[in-house]
Structure formats: C-alpha cells, structure tokens
Amino acid sequence: MNDEFIKKLAKITIRNGRIDKRIIKYVLSNLSRKELIVYLAALKKSVYENSVRVISSQKLSDKAKKSIRAKLKDRTVFFEQDKSLGAGLKIILDDSIIDLTFSGYITRVLEQLKA
C-alpha cells in the first residue's frame, strides 16, 4: 500500500469523535509494521489538527472545562496536567502556544524591560 492510501485511512478512522472499528480491524490485519508506523503518525496528526491542548498545573473544575469547551466548540479539547507549570494555563492550538501562566507573564515582562 502506498503512503497516500494509508494517510486517507487514518483521516477516516475517526469521525464525529468516534472510531470506526471496521477500519481498525482492516488496518491491524493488513498493514505491515512499517505501514502501521505511517498510519499511526497520520492518525496522530489528524487528531491534533482539529484539537486544542489545555495544560494546567492543577486539575480544572468541571465548570472551567465546560467554559473552555464552549469557547472552542468546533475543536476537540484535551485537558492535561503538568505540575511543573505553575499558576495559569498553557494552550496549544495548532502550531501556536498561548502561555497564560504566571511564569510566562514574568518572562515576557523581563524581556520587555531588557529591550
């Protein structure tokens, strides 16, 4: 199988937030190890293209998660916890990183003072 076909399989594996089990069975039965690596990379890319990662140092309340999801309703939101982050949030949207952490704010202020 060529890479383009494998990438198309990856794109149609998840639709409307659901995994198509028929495609998964086909992939596991018919792809070689090398082809599976291409498939998994394409699947990961496909998932993250339409998603947002929200990273915080503490677990967010259900109310906060609901509010964030409402603002980003056209994307899938993944919530992660990183205790080393400090106060605030870090949002990763496509190739952009929005740093709303306290340490990020201090770093930006110090850089502006240096200039």
Image (cartoon, rainbow, N blue to C red):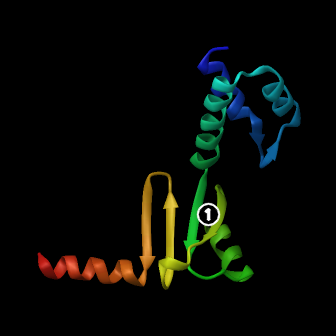
Q: Quadrant of the N terminus?
A: top right
Q: Is residue 66 left or right of residue 22?
A: left
Three-letter code, disc 1: Leu
- Where residue 63 appears, as percent x and y from the top left, is 72, 82
The quadrant of the image that shows the C terminus is: bottom left
- Relative height, residue 100 to residue 98 (above, below): below
Extreme-left residue of the structure:
115
Q: Is residue 109 above or below residue 36?
A: below
Quarter assignment of residue 112 = bottom left
The residue drawn where x is 58% and y is 59% is: 52
The reply, left or right, for residue 58 in relation to residue 62 is left
Residue at x 49%, y 85% (from the top left corner): 87
What residue occupies the far top of the structure in this picture?
1
Location of residue 36 in the rendering, given as x and y in whole percent from the top left corner: 68, 29
In-front residue for pair 40/67: 40
Residue bearing mark 1 = 72
Q: Position of residue 108 (x, y in %)?
A: 28, 77
75 with respect to 104 (left or right): right
Rendered position, 27 above or below 93: above
Q: Residue at x 86, y 30 (%)?
A: 25
In percent of width and height, residue 58 lies at 61, 82
**SS state under label 1:** loop
